[in-house]
Structure formats: structure tokens, C-alpha cells
């Protein structure tokens, strides 16, 4: 029985190994942070579309938020001798070994959307600080630079949380009339954000002029709590990511604004870069895709 | 009566924390805030009551959070405005939950696999099914009547109803006594003619059904079915049950304690938010209170 299993396994593995040379196609290994996240799903679709256009083949793995699993996936890509790897890192530190191993094996590796401590061959993404800056500047404009703001953090210690926090606080520092009266983590989660907002309505109530949520899920939770308390017309709510729920809410005039992170631009950019590197064409090592502020006026452009 | 007396320490702890909070933050003791607290605990409460059944038999259910996500997504699919009467999405969610629980129960009793492993498997598989069914994206655009289930005091009423029925069932009906007997000493229960497998199967199924109901209420409250919702909910629910004095080895405890446990967790959560305690410290405080509450409770029982 064991021998039979080993035989089947060997057959399957040799099949995998041969496929590349058989077809002679460019093969790119992709390890994604988490395919149950809407943004990552959009990123994935953009990559597949671009890969089909360019005639390259992707092997896509879901790391399910585990940096450890991600490193294993990259090790498998290296063993398969893929032509390039696209890494959508789970964590700054813990995903770094994946980058180091690929570089050591001489396989180009491109980080997409977020960074690792170890330097990859190239990076495609957006500056997360910028998303928070756009959101906070919008709040400052709406409040004429005076008022009380509360902020909902993502998972404490994740790169996006740290950077959006920094971007928001740097921007707040430029508006002495804006005060951050409370900040708390709702762990990127809509239900937790709703409870947090309900609690803030109790403790701070009419003092709150604006809510900045570090992602749209939390912004939607805050919005629901404010609507149920009948306070929405007095409080500005802004999120980040432009998920479809949030875009619809912006269009309907419920959510004030969100910040669009260009999943398509990042996904296409990553595949383009990988192909350029494989074909030994000149490439940029840092490609930044800009964020865009979405309000009721331009929401239609982003809804599809 | 005896179970209520043994929960006395927990009631005192709850009152002390409540009193301290009302002094530091008077807003704590207002009707809207207290309604907030009970509404916020109602989902965890529904799950905790469900898992009480399983813990009483000496088992465990780690799949609750994933089942919440799956049944929330399934309910949401049937809850688009004008599609079906509201009973259809509710029933779909509860039935999906009951099916997951039933599979858990069957594998535990017929397959004789440890509950920890079975429900760990279900935790992974149900999450996967939720992602497949929803295509990895939240299911939104839910009808008014469905969203009503998650608004105002409705989640609280659902939680109270679930608690009352379970309390009657566990403390007064024969089936309830059998649950305690199975958890207390499985062999003795079997020797006295109790259908041990049937009782366990019932416990897992009702636990799954209540997780399904929790998923329906959650989806209605946040107005979407989220495939990634409910992560870690099983541990919050188990924590509430254990704080409430139900033994992890089975046979001891009950729904009254579970309600108090859920309430204590909700009050602490609400209090820490009202006081604007930093997220880092919130996690530490919650951890200490979970262990501390159980430790105090056990000390008192020994003395």
C-alpha cells in the first residue's frame, strides 16, 4: 500500500516537473495573503486576466494569512523551478524567508501590495500611508479643519494598520483644529466595528464629528451603528479599500467617502513586471500605483 | 437552586464590575448602554448556550465560528429583497447549522473520532464551503424584513428565547437529565439504559442549529453574509460557558451560568471601550479575567 502511494506520488511529481518543459510556457508561482478577502480576490482576478493576455501560466496558492504556509509555498515553487514568483506577503518579518530563499535560488520574486523586510527583485503596490492621508484630508475639508475624530484600527501590528495609522496621525498633525478623541482596534471586522461604534456613541455621543476606519468593512460597521442611532447625518464616515459594498453606500449617499486601492493596477503590474524580468527587459524596482479618493460625485466610475 | 447558589460568586463579580464602571463612567448605567451590552452579547450568547449542551456531554465544538459564517452566507443568499418570505432564509441558515452539527455528532458517535478532531475538521471544511458558496465575497443587498432580525432589541429577544427553552429542557426534561448523566459518567449512563449515542447526537445537532441561528442574526445585524465572519467565535462562546461554571469534562453546569458568563464578557468589553482602554491592554485584561473568573469559581467550590 505504502509503495503504491509512493509510486503514485512520484508519478504525479514527475508529471508536475515535466509540464513546464513540455509546454515551454512561462510559469509564474503566486502566493496570496488570503483568498477570503475581497481585495485579494480582485487582485487575483486581475493577475489571471493579465496572464491570459500575455500567454503565461500562473500557479496560484492561498496562504490563508499564515506566513509559515506562505514560506512553504514558495519553497515548493523553487523546487518546481518556476520562472518567477509573485508574493503577496502575509507579514513584514515572517514572510521574509520566502523572499530570501527565492533570491538565493536565483528566481526573481516580486512583492505585490505589501512589503517584506527582505528586499525582493521588485515591488508593486501602493503607499498605505497615502490612503489614510487622503481620507483624513477629506475629513479636514468637510469639517473646515475643526472637530473631533475617532479612528478604528485594523489588527494591531499588521503593516497596513501601522502605515494607515502613521498616515492618519501625520495628517492630523497638520490640522491643529482636528482632535483624535478615541482610537481602538476593531480588527478589520464589520461586526466588531459595529459594537465599538455603539459603545463610542454611548461614551462620546454628540462629541464625534467624524469616523476614520482603516478599512471599509469597519467603516460599514460604524455606518450601521450610526444609522441605527439616528446620528448619521451628524457624523462623517470614511473608509479605505473601495469594496463593492462601500462603493454602493457611497453612491447612495450613506458613506461619505472611501479610498480606492487599485487592485487591477497592482495585479496587472505584478504580472507585467514578472514577464519583463523573465524576458530580461529593463524594469523599475519600485512601481507605485496611486490611491484615489471616492466620493458620491465619482463613485460610478469605480462601480462595475 | 443549587446551580444558582454556586453561581453566586459570578453574580457578585458582575455587580462589582458594574458598580465600578457606573462610578467611573456614569453612562454605563443608562438604558441605551445596557441595551447595547445585551445586544452585543446576544450572538455570543446564542452560540454559548448551544455549546453548553456539547460541553455538558463532555465533548467540545470548535466549528462554531465557521458554521456561523456558512449559515450567514446561506441565509443571505435567500434574503435578497423580494425573493422569499423571511422564514426561508432563517430556516435555511438554521438547517445548514443543524446539518453541520449533525455531521459532527455522527462522526463523534458512529465514527468514534475525538470531538476535538471532528469539530476541528468541520471548522476548516465549513469555512471552505462558505467561501465556495459565496465566491469569496460578502453577500449583500439583503431585504428589509431580514435585516429587522438584527436590529433594535430583536437579537436580545432571540437570545432570551433560546436561553429559556434551553433552561427548561436542561433542568426539567428527561432529555436534559440524560445529557448530564452522559457527561458525568458515560458508562454508568449506558448501564442505566440511556441511549448515549442518541443524546450526544442531539447535543451536537442542537449546538450546530444554534450556531446557524447565531449566523442568521449576525448576517442580519451587519446586513451581509460574510464568508470570513465569526473567526474565533467558538473560543468566545466556550469561554462564556466555562466562566459560567460548566465543566470542560462534562456533567456539571448549565445555561444560567452560561448567560452570566456571556454577560460578564460583554460588560468587560463595553466597559473597556467606554474607558477607551488601548487595544493592547484590552486583550491582556480579557485574558486575565477569563482565567481569573474560573479560578475564583473553582476555589469557592472546593472550600
Image (spheres, coloured by chain):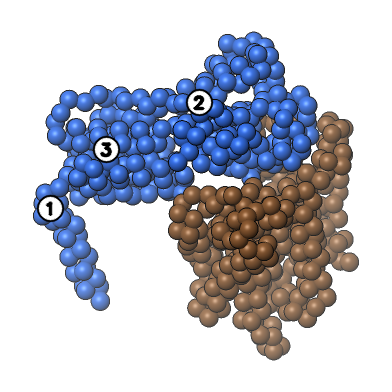
| Mark linked to residue A261 | none
Task: Please tell me whether mark 2 or mark 1 is closer to you in this view.
Answer: 2
The image quadrant that residue B177 belongs to is bottom right
| Mark linked to residue A23 | 1
Residue A19 visible in rendering: yes
**Reading the chain from its start, which is encountered first: label 2 or label 1?**
1
Q: Residue at x 52, y 32 (%)?
A: A299
> Which residue carries the number 2 mark?
A293
Q: Find the distance from the CA under tag 2 to the CA under tag 3.
A: 25 Å
Q: Residue at x 63, y 72 (%)?
A: B205
Task: Please tell me whether mark 2 or mark 3 is closer to you in this view.
Answer: 2
Tell me: residue B8, above or below residue A245: below
Tell me: residue A295, above or below residue B125: above
Say yes or no: labels 3 and 1 on the same chain: yes
Secondary structure of the residue carrying tag 3 is helix
Counting from the top left corner in percent of width and height, residue A266 is at: 35, 33
Counting from the top left corner in percent of width and height, residue B122 is at: 51, 64
Q: Are marks 2 and 1 in contact (CB under 8 Å)?
A: no
Q: Nearer the viewer, residue A78 or A192?
A: A192
Q: Residue at x 83, y 37 (%)?
A: B28
**Reading the chain from its start, which is encountered first: label 3 or label 1?**
1
**Reading the chain from its start, which is encountered first: label 2 or label 3?**
3
Q: Residue at x 46, y 49 (%)?
A: A36
Q: In the picture, which quadrant includes the C terminus of chain A?
A: top left
| Mark linked to residue A271 | 3
Mark 3 chain: A
Secondary structure of the residue carrying tag 1 is helix
Q: Badge 1 local density, few (<14 within 10 Å), some, or many (20+)?
A: few
Mark 1 chain: A
**Chain letter, brown:** B
Image colour for chain A is blue
Q: Horizontally, is B143 left or right of B299 in the view?
A: left
Amino acid at each position: 500500500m505504502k509503495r503504491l502511494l509512493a509510486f503514485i506520488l512520484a508519478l504525479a511529481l514527475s508529471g508536475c516537473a515535466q509540464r513546464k518543459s513540455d509546454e515551454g510556457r512561462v510559469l509564474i508561482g503566486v502566493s496570496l495573503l488570503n483568498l477570503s478577502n475581497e481585495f485579494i480576490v480582485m487582485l487575483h482576478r486581475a493577475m489571471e486576466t493579465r496572464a491570459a493576455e500575455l500567454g503565461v501560466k500562473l500557479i496560484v496558492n492561498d496562504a490563508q494569512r499564515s506566513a509559515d504556509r506562505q514560506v512553504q509555498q514558495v519553497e515548493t515553487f523553487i523546487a518546481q523551478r518556476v520562472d518567477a514568483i509573485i508574493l503577496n506577503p502575509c507579514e513584514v518579518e515572517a514572510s521574509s524567508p520566502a523572499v530570501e530563499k527565492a533570491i538565493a535560488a536565483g528566481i526573481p520574486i516580486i512583492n505585490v501590495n505589501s512589503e517584506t523586510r527582505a528586499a525582493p527583485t521588485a515591488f508593486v503596490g501602493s503607499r498605505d500611508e497615502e490612503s489614510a492621508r487622503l481620507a483624513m484630508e477629506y475629513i479636514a475639508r468637510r469639517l473646515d479643519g475643526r472637530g473631533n475624530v475617532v479612528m478604528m484600527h485594523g489588527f494591531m501590528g499588521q503593516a497596513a494598520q501601522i502605515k494607515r495609522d502613521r498616515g492618519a496621525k501625520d495628517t492630523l498633525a497638520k490640522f491643529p483644529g482636528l482632535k483624535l478623541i478615541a482610537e481602538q482596534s476593531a480588527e478589520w471586522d464589520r461586526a466588531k466595528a459595529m459594537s465599538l461604534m455603539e459603545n463610542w456613541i454611548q461614551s462620546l455621543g454628540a462629541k464625534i464629528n467624524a469616523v476614520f476606519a482603516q478599512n471599509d468593512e469597519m467603516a460599514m460597521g460604524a455606518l450601521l451603528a450610526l444609522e441605527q442611532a439616528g446620528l448619521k447625518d451628524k457624523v462623517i464616515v470614511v473608509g479605505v479599500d473601495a469594496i463593492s459594498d462601500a462603493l454602493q453606500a457611497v453612491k447612495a449617499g450613506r458613506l461619505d467617502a472611501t479610498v480606492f486601492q487599485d487592485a487591477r493596477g497592482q495585479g496587472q503590474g505584478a504580472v507585467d513586471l514578472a514577464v519583463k524580468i523573465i524576458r530580461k527587459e529593463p524594469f523599475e524596482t519600485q512601481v507605485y500605483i496611486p490611491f484615489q479618493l471616492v466620493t458620491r460625485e465619482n463613485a460610478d466610475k469605480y462601480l462595475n | 437552586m443549587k446551580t444558582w447558589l454556586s453561581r453566586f460568586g459570578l453574580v457578585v463579580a458582575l455587580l462589582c464590575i458594574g458598580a465600578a464602571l457606573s462610578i467611573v463612567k456614569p453612562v454605563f448605567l443608562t438604558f441605551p448602554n445596557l441595551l447595547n451590552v445585551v445586544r452585543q452579547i446576544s450572538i455570543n450568547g446564542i452560540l454559548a448556550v448551544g455549546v453548553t449542551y456539547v460541553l455538558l456531554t463532555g465533548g467540545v465544538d470548535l466549528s462554531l465560528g465557521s458554521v456561523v459564517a456558512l449559515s450567514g452566507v446561506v441565509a443571505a443568499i435567500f434574503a435578497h429583497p423580494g425573493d422569499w418570505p423571511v422564514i426561508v432564509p432563517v430556516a435555511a441558515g438554521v438547517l445548514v447549522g443543524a446539518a453541520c452539527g449533525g455531521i459532527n455528532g455522527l462522526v463523534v458517535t458512529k465514527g468514534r473520532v475525538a470531538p476535538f478532531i471532528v469539530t476541528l475538521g468541520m471548522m476548516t471544511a465549513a469555512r471552505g464551503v462558505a467561501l465556495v458558496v459565496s465566491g469569496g465575497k460578502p453577500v449583500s443587498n439583503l431585504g428589509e424584513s431580514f435585516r429587522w432580525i438584527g436590529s433594535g432589541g430583536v437579537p436580545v429577544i432571540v437570545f432570551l428565547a433560546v436561553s429559556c427553552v434551553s433552561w427548561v429542557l436542561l433542568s426539567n426534561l428527561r432529555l436534559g437529565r440524560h445529557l448530564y448523566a452522559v457527561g458525568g459518567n458515560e458508562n454508568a449512563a449506558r448501564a442505566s439504559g440511556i441511549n448515549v449515542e442518541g443524546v450526544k447526537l442531539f447535543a451536537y445537532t442542537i449546538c450546530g442549529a444554534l450556531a446557524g441561528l447565531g449566523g442568521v442574526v449576525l448576517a442580519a445585524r451587519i446586513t451581509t453574509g460574510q464568508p470570513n465572519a465569526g473567526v474565533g467565535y467558538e473560543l468566545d462562546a466556550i469561554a462564556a460557558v466555562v466562566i459560567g461554571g460548566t465543566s470542560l469534562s462534562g456533567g456539571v453546569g448549565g445555561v444560567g451560568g452560561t448567560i452570566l458568563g456571556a454577560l460578564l464578557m460583554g460588560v468587560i468589553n463595553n466597559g473597556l471601550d467606554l474607558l477607551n482602554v488601548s487595544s493592547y491592554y484590552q486583550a491582556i485584561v480579557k485574558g486575565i479575567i477569563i482565567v481569573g473568573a474560573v479560578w475564583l469559581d473553582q476555589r469557592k467550590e472546593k472550600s
